Structures are given as C-alpha cells and as structure tokens.
Amino acid sequence: MNAEANLTEVAPEREIAVAEGDTLVKVKDLSVVFGGLTALDSVSFDIRRGEILGLIGPNGAGKTTCFNAMTGVYRPSQGSVTLEGNSLLGLKKHRITRLGLARTFQNIRLFGEMTALENVAVGLDARHKSGMISAMFRTPRHYREEKQIITRGMELLEFVGIADRAFDKSKDLPYGYQRRLEIARALATDPKLLCLDEPAAGFNPVEKEELMELIRTVRDEGYTVLIIEHDMKLVMGVTDRIVVLEFGKKIADAVPAAIREDPAVIAAYLGQEEPDGTA
Amino acid sequence: MSSDWISFDFGALIDSFWATTFDGLTLGAIYALVALGYTLVYGVLNLINFAHSEVFIAGAFAVVFFLSALGFGPSAPTLPIGMLILDLVLAGIIAMVVSGGTAVLVERIAYKPLRNRGASRLAFLISAIGMSFVLQYIFYEWRGATAEPAVTMFRPKPIFEVFGSIIDSQQLTIFIAAVVMMVCVDQIVQRTKLGRGIRAVAQDPDTATLMGVNKERIIVATFAIGGFLAGAAALFYVMRVPSGVFYMGGFILGIKAFTAAVLGGIGNVRGALLGGLLVGLIGNYGATILGDSQWTDVVIFIVLILVLMIRPNGILGSNLGEARV
Amino acid sequence: MSAHSPLSSVGAKQAEAYGKLGHQRPNWYLRMKSWWNDRSRWQQWLILLIVVVLAYLLPVINPPLITTEPSNDFAISCFNMALYGLVALGLNVVVGQAGLLDLGYIGFFAVGAYTASLWTSPDSPLVHIPYLWTLPLAMIVTVVFGIALGIPTLRLRGDYLAIVTLGFGEIIRLLATIVPVLKGNTGFQNVGRPPGEIDGAPIFSASNGLPWYWFTVTFIVIVMILLGNLERSRVGRAWFAIREDEDAAEIMGVPTFRFKLAAFGTGAALGGLSGALLAGQVGFVNNQKFDVPTSILFLAAVILGGQGNKLGVVIGGAIVAYVPLRFTALGGWKFLIFGIVLVLLMIFRSQGLFGKKPKLLTYTARIRRKVKKEGPPGDDEGTPPKTAPRRGGAA
C-alpha cells in the first residue's frame, strides 16, 4: 500500500525495537511537585506495545499532570519515563515527539488559521528534512516531501473521516472534526505511542461510539494508545487495561472488569460511577 | 590598552573608585524607581510597558515647567531651606500626578481595547511600542529636539567623607528618598489589601476574579503606582541631570531600568531595588574604564544579554506571580 | 496561486463578505478577488508580469499627481520606496511570519551599510574590494550578528526579544558614534558602486536614481520568489505554527529554536543587503542615519502592509517611504503619524491593509479540485474507511 512505501522512504529507521505485548513505555516513581503541592506522587506503570491503556481518576487526580510530565511539558521532581528503554526526561519536546510519542490536547490546540491539511502537514514535517536551501530552491527532496504530504496527509484525513474539509481553516471546522483533526495531526508524526487527552470531551453518544471505533482501528494498525478520559463507558468499552490515579497516587492497575469491582476505585469516585458505567 | 576600536583604562577606575561608586548608587536608586514600574506591570499583565519611559519623562517635563515657573533657573537659587523643601516636594507631587495620569491614560488607550478583543501578545507589544513612540513625538512636536533649559535645584553640600570621597546632600537625598519609597511600595504589596489583589492577579487572573478581586481596578492601580514612582524618579533625575529633559530622555533610561528589573528578577519588588543599584554601579564602572559615558549604555546592554543568557529569572528570582511554565 | 476554479457558491461568497471584524467587505474588493481567482494560471502570471514591468517604468513615466517632484527627485524617491519595500520583506519574515518582534531591525541595516562603506570607501583603513562583493559580505556579516543576538534571546519569551532588539538597535548607533574607526559623524564618503559606464560617466551614481531603483526592484522580485518558496515548505509551515502556538508546534515535532534562529538570520540578511544598497546609492554613511525611530517606521511598514503578506508589506514599505517624500511639509511629523497608525491598526485592524494567511502547501492544485468536486472516497456517514495508514514496523 502507498502508506508503507512512503513510510520507508522517509523514515527507514522507524522500526519498533519492542515486540508486541512487551513494555514500550515505562513510567517509574514519577513525581511532580509545584511549590508546596505534590501533583503526582511516585506513580509507576507500564504501557505495553499494541495495547490501549486508560488513565482515569477523579478531577485533580493528576492525569494531565502525568501526561505533561511524560511529554516534556512539566519537569518531574523525581522518577523516570522511558520509551523503548530511552529516557525521555529533560529532553526538548520536539525530541520526545521524534522518539515516537505524540499527543492530543484536552483543550484543542490546533493551528487555527491553518487548513486541516496544513495542520497535518506540520505533523508530517516532524519526519521530514527539508531546510532553508531545499525549500528556497525546490530541490528534489522538497518535491518528494511535499508530494508525500499530499498523499499521506489526505490518507490520514480520510482515515479520521474529515477529508471533505481538507482545505478549510481548522478554526472553521465543526467541533467533532477539530477533535478528529487533532488525532490525525498526532498520527502524522508517526508515533509509537499515541496519547489522547480526553478525546471524547463534548461528544454525544453517537460520536463517542464512532471515536471508540476509530481508536480501535488506530490500535489495529499497529499504534499503541494511552487515553485519559472521564467517560466510564468509553473507557470500559475501548481499553485493554486501566490505571487509576487519586490525589496523585496510583490506586489500581488492572483490566476493566477488575477495575469496575475494585472498592478503592469506587470509593475514589464517591458514587460518581453508576452501575452501568456512565460517569 | 588602547586602539582605534576600543580602549580600557583600569587606572581611572582605581583612582576614582569611591566617587564612582557613590554616584553609581545614586543613579541606581533612580533606575530602581523606574524599574519598579516595569516590574509591577510585567508581573500583573505579563507585558513590557514600553511607554513607561515616556511616563517618566512626562513627569520630568512637569518638574521643569513647575520649577521654571517658580523662578528656578540654571544657577542654584537662594532660598530659605524651608521654602526649598516645600518647592521640591510640590514639584515631586506634581510629577507623580502627571506621570501617574499618563500611565493610566496609556493603559486605557493602548492596552484595554486590546484586552477586550483578546488580542495576541504580539499585538500588545506592538501597541506598547507604538504608544511609546507617539508620546515621544508628541513631546518632540511640542518642545522640539533640544533639551529644556537647565533647572538647578540646589547646590550640593558635602555631608560625609568616606574613603577619601565625598557624599553630598544631593546624593544622600536621592538615595534615601528613593529607598524609603521603595520600602513603602514593598510594604503595600506585601501587607495591604491592594497588594494582595496585585499579587493575586499576577499569579492567576481568572481565579482572582472568581475570588472577588476587581481585575480592572487592580490593573489601573498597578499602572498608577508605577506612574507615581516614575514621577518621583523624574524629580530626582532633574535634580541629578538638570539639562537632561528632552523628548528622547526617557528612552535610554527606560532600557537601563528594564535591565535593572530583569537583573533583580522581573516581577520582584525587592529585585528592582537590587537590580537598579547594580545597574547604576556597573554602568558607571564601565564608563570609567572605557573612557566615555556613552559606553555606559553599551555595557548595560551587554549585562542585559548576559543576564538573559545565564539567569533569566534574575538574581532574586521572579516571584510576584509564580514562575510560569 | 489558485488554479482556475468554478464559480463559488453564493454561501461561500457570503462567508467571504464578512471579514474578521464582521463587517461587510466592500463589493469592489469581492469582485476583484473573484475576478482574480477566475483567471487561469497563465493569465495570472501575465498580469503579474505587466505589473512588474509597470513598476520598473514608474520613475520613467513620472505620473504628475503621484510624483514627488519638484522637492524630491522622483527616481531617487522610487529607489527609497523600493528600499523600504525590501526592508519590509526582511522584517516580515521575522515579525509577520515567525511572529518574533524585532524592534531593532535598523541595527542590521546599519551593519550592512557600514560593511559596504568599510570595504569600499577611501576613508576606510581596510582593504578595498569591488562594491558588488560587499553585498554578499554584508549579508554574511549581518547574519553573524543576527545569530549572535538570537542565540541567547530566542530561547526566551517574545517580550524579552523585543526589548533586547530595541537595545541592539540603539547600541549599534552608539557604537557607530564612539568607536573611532567607525568615524561617528564624519562618516565615510565615496562609498563604492556597481561597475559600468555610459559615455564616460558611471551608470550608478548618487544623482541618478534610476539604475539603483531597477537594481533594487530586481532584488525585490528575486527575494519574493525565494520567500514564496519558503512559505510553501516545511520552513514556512514551521514559522506559521510557531507564530500560532509555539508550544503546540514544538510538541508536534517542530524544532522551534532552530527555526526561530533561521527566521532571525533571514531577516538579518535582508536588512544587511538593504543597508549596503542604501550606502551605495547615497554614497555617504555616518551615524546620523540609523536610529531607533527608523526601526519603528520599518515596523509600521510591515504592520500597515499586512503581516505575512509579501506583496502587502512591500506596498506598506513603499507607502511609509513615499508619504514624507511627497508631502514634504510633514517633516518630523511622520514619526508621530506612523506611531498613531501603529496603535490604531493594532486596535482596529491588526491584519493591516492586505493581511491574509498565505498558502503553506505546494502542488495542491489537483487535489484541491478533486476535494471540491467530489469529496474523498469512503462512505457518507463519516465512519472511518477500512483503508487505514498502516503503522510501519514488524510485529
């Protein structure tokens, strides 16, 4: 298929060193302290290649803090985060993305004035090498990479289902399209781990169902996924394993069926969780 | 060492070390007062108020006009000490009102409309520099390019002699008055309700509003305080540099004062005092070594670059609001 | 440049009519815009060619109402307009594209002018080289300055960059005054010029603006083409993303520091080139020409023309140069006027006269047509098609 041919052309070293099922990302004793507040307290968990891992917890539990510490936005006060054995701590954010960790944002952070395809292009550019000279003088490398943006970019937009608005400014897109564009843009960076920060916020049940289908397809195509979510139905329905945080600490780490029965988790949510799993 | 490009004369510094130091501290106190204006506005709005230099020079113009009207001129007047003090205090108050008013005016015209429109940071900065420019050239059109006629307030009398150098009444007045004012501002920020409001808005404007703090009032108050301090600095500036009041007079002093704010820690009130004194000293030492007072500006600029490279949070750290990620 | 496209639907026209501020755009503007979009590609290029030819001929035509004579020689005025246009192009890369506020652009301009003077003027102690060689030399020297200035400051927030560049502009002026070799007020005379003579008199001289004007316009055309290529590339997209949301850009894999430095360096190079051109035309360089207020005029040119729009900022530069030359009574008022223009623009129309988002992708004509006509393959309900981009790597 075209996608494979283009992938090897541009990024031949993008094989994943880890086998299916083995640990891809290891978070160990991660702590984040702001002034007097311990937002994250010695949290440890693994993310295995090929799984969909959910990260849940009541408001303020530290989920987004954990995310931000993994992606280089916050500096942890102690602990480690490794991807395929490489430490991510202290690296600049774009280096972390190059190593294979991509994310979406809780409050959408698209490049509003750019079109949908252009947003995806920025993600694809993470793997490109054109610089000032190539661009100014339109070298063959520039030509190759720009063409690849069109083919792979449109492919990604079709994959998430928004290709009909490829040339509209992203700020003009409907909300559901914007959320899906964020996913397409993150996928464009060709990640090993895709981190979704509340991807279903603001969706109605039908849209949530479509999103779950999309996430499963993403995983089937070979990506590993980490999701932060509040919606229990979505989390229970799509994840293979769940890690639960409360007040910055990990309180559970098991398959969804076990989490549902876990008294500590139920207590943490203090009756917010209904028996049928809606938040 | 001397050449066609640049020459160093350390001997000159050693010879006049203490005199240079005391003078540097005096200038530094003036810089510190202006720096406070920059630092407070930056802490609260995250914005460099470029027009602050013109707020300062407006106060200086006011001082010169007022004192000239009272009959002060290039040579020091003969007045009973009580009269003199009264005139100077009045001049100071007028300068503070003029500068404070200018500051608030700038805020209302150039920044508030942008806040209402949710403009980008770049837009604020451009508006700020535009406003600074407009004010400069209003002064230029009104009073021309040459400096106002010198207004000498009093002949400095030697008070102390330390290490062979003289500290005179002018230096003492400026230094003590400036430090007193800064301590007052520090206390206001630390202990009063207004100060708490300022610190709250600096840390987190949205939460502050939710807690009942009137953000707009705090912003106006911050600009006003900065303006008052700049007005006081203007009085001392005219005292120290009687012939330095002209349309561009605020510009270079503004950059030095901002360097002071960054050096001490932007958003940090005590940092502004420390930074100001240091900038005054370093500028003077540099000018003595390099042989030309215009080198002061170059030296201070290099200090700014070095601080930004090595320790952008300043010596005492930014602490009005939390250091943002 | 848009390919031939079918007539837009009424809805799209309506949407276009409501610009950023929600006002109705004037009808003539909309009509012009759709007329332009309806032209085929070769027609658009032809029109541009005619415009460029007219631009070259402008000083020769010397139209009566527009001319700056008798007070200012029109050819030299045109040269100044073109020079400001070139400066605006350079500053646009820094401010308009990457969103970095450089308030001391005059510094680069001065470095370029002094480089040209130091290596060609008989007043200078340095070895002499032909004037044309000083053009690339000026660009290299300014890039070095730009990078030296950028490395410590581009890591920090935008506000710090603004004040540091402001200081830089002033420092360059001061150095020109107090460093003995740079000759302060006396300056350098008889700065070099490109070679060539007609009837025994040099073609390029201080009194004949026409060859200098054509020389500069040629540079503008070349630079606009190169900058256009940059826009529609990985570099241009990175700059745009940095301007929109620097943190998000970095998280999406953009090496922001490197690209900010590249923008700064590019702007510096163009500033240096402009300075060297000015030095050549006027033939005399001293410390009076390079002050911070002129830097602010440059900024006004970019903001007025429309940040991010190459042609717009060239026109903006031309306007800023033209107004004081045509209306000589203004004199020093120009600073006040353009300062007020800056503040008003920020409040009421931050996109300037011609601000628009440029296209950031190349080779999109075909796919654009396809998307407009038929929509993408896949079913209508919006569920993801089964043809997914397979992730590389063996199991």
Image (cartoon, rainbow, N blue to C red):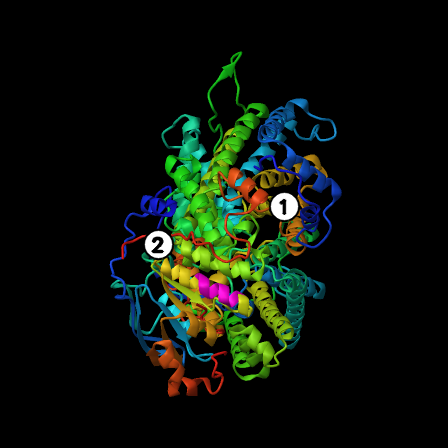
Identify the subunit bearing mark 1: C
* Figure quadrant of residue A268: bottom left
**Left or right side of B263 for A50:** left
Q: Which mark is residue C391?
A: 2
Q: Which SS type dominates the magenta stretch? A: helix
Q: Amino acid at mark 1?
A: Leu
- On screen, residue C71 versus residue B153, left or right, reads right
Does residue C178 appear anywhere in the picture? no
Q: Is residue B47 magenta?
A: no
**Mark 1 residue crowding within 10 angstroms, few (<14) / some (14–19) / many (20+):** many
Q: How many marks?
A: 2
**Residue B248 disc label:** none
Measuring from the top left, give residue C257's x and y in whole percent.
40, 53
Give SS at disc 1: helix
Residue drawn where x is 53% and y is 30% of the image: C216
CB within 8 Å, label 2 to label 1: no
- Can the viewer see residue C65? yes
Q: Amino acid at mark 2?
A: Arg
Q: Which residues are magenta?
A: A207-214
Q: Are marks 2 and 1 on the same chain?
A: yes
Residue annotated with mark 1: C304
Give the image quarter of residue A237.
bottom left
